[in-house]
Image (tube, rainbow, N blue to C red):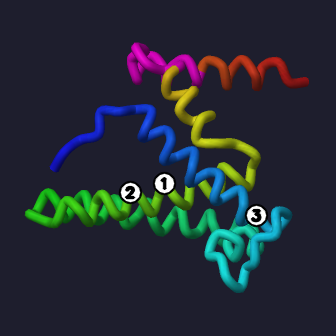
């Protein structure tokens, strides 16, 4: 299987999907009777957040199956489903894939252990600042 090395093409695919999701918002005329995205958004956060949980579980199951000789394409398909539903959540809450990419770029070159410790310290400082 060939890996894509053109990041701009990857980001373009995410941007196109994000634009499609935006166009399916009920406020943009998305019809819940004809659009899965519009239906999820119309039903509210509980609907798409439940799907995120289900898809995350399916990613875990597909990965575990790979350890026992399972099909790699199943993992890829389940991750695609998870990303899709996460993008619906991002759109609902006014964020975009570019926001996520920017955050990942901000973290680049930082140890994951250091990043987690920094987030804990920031959360602790925020709690201490509150009256």
Which residue in the structure is indicated by mark 3? 25
Horizontal and vertical percent position of residue 69:
9, 63
- Mark 3 lies on a secondary structure that is loop
User: Is label 1 in contact with label 2 (beta carbons under 8 Å)?
Assistant: yes
Asked if residue 37 is positioned above or below residue 59 in the image, the reply reads below
Residue 91: x %, y % from top left: 69, 52
Q: Earlier in the sequence, mark 2 or mark 3?
A: 3
**Magenta-drawn stretch contains 52:** no
Q: Counting other residues with Cα less than 10 Å from the Cα at mark 1, is it few (<14), some (14-19), or many (20 or more)?
A: some
Q: Quadrant of the C terminus?
A: top right
Cβ atoms at labels 3 and 1 below 8 Å apart:
no
Q: Which residues are magenta?
A: 106-120
Q: Position of residue 112 (x, y in %)?
A: 40, 23
Picture disc at residue 65: none
Q: Residue at x 50, y 28 (%)?
A: 104
Q: Which mark is residue 79?
A: 2
Q: Quadrant of residue 8?
A: top left
Picture layout, residue 92 above or below residue 46: above
Identify the residue shown where x is 50% and y is 22%. Answer: 105
Question: Which one is in front in this view, the residue at disc 3 or the one at disc 1?
Answer: 3
Q: Residue at x 56, y 54 (%)?
A: 17
In three-dimensional space, the C-alpha distance between marks 2 and 3, rounded to whole angstroms, equals 23 Å
Q: Is residue 90 left or right of residue 76?
A: right
Give 56 or 40, whichever is nearer the viewer.
40
Is 43 left, or right, of 80 in this rendering?
right
Measured Cα–Cα span from mark 1 to mark 2: 6 Å
Q: Nearer the viewer, mark 2 or mark 3?
A: 3
Residue drawn 67% across and 25% down?
A: 123
Q: CA distance from mark 3 to mark 1?
A: 18 Å
Q: Between residues 15 and 65, which one lies in front from this camera angle?
A: 15
Q: Give the residue number, with chain letter if any, for mark 1.
A: 83
On the image, the x and y values in percent for residue 6 come to 35, 33
């Amino acid at each position: 299987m060939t890996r894509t090395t053109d990041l701009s093409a990857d980001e373009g695919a995410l941007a196109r999907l994000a634009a499609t999701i935006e166009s399916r918002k009920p406020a943009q005329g998305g019809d819940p009777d004809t659009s899965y995205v519009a239906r999820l958004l119309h039903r509210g956060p509980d609907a798409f957040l439940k799907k995120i949980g289900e898809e995350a579980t399916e990613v875990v199951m597909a990965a575990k199956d790979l350890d026992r000789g399972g099909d790699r394409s199943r993992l890829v398909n389940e991750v695609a489903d998870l990303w899709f539903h996460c993008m619906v959540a991002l759109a609902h809450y006014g964020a975009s894939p570019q926001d996520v990419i920017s955050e990942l770029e901000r973290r680049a070159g930082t140890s994951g252990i250091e990043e987690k410790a920094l987030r804990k310290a920031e959360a602790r400082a925020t709690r201490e600042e509150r009256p």
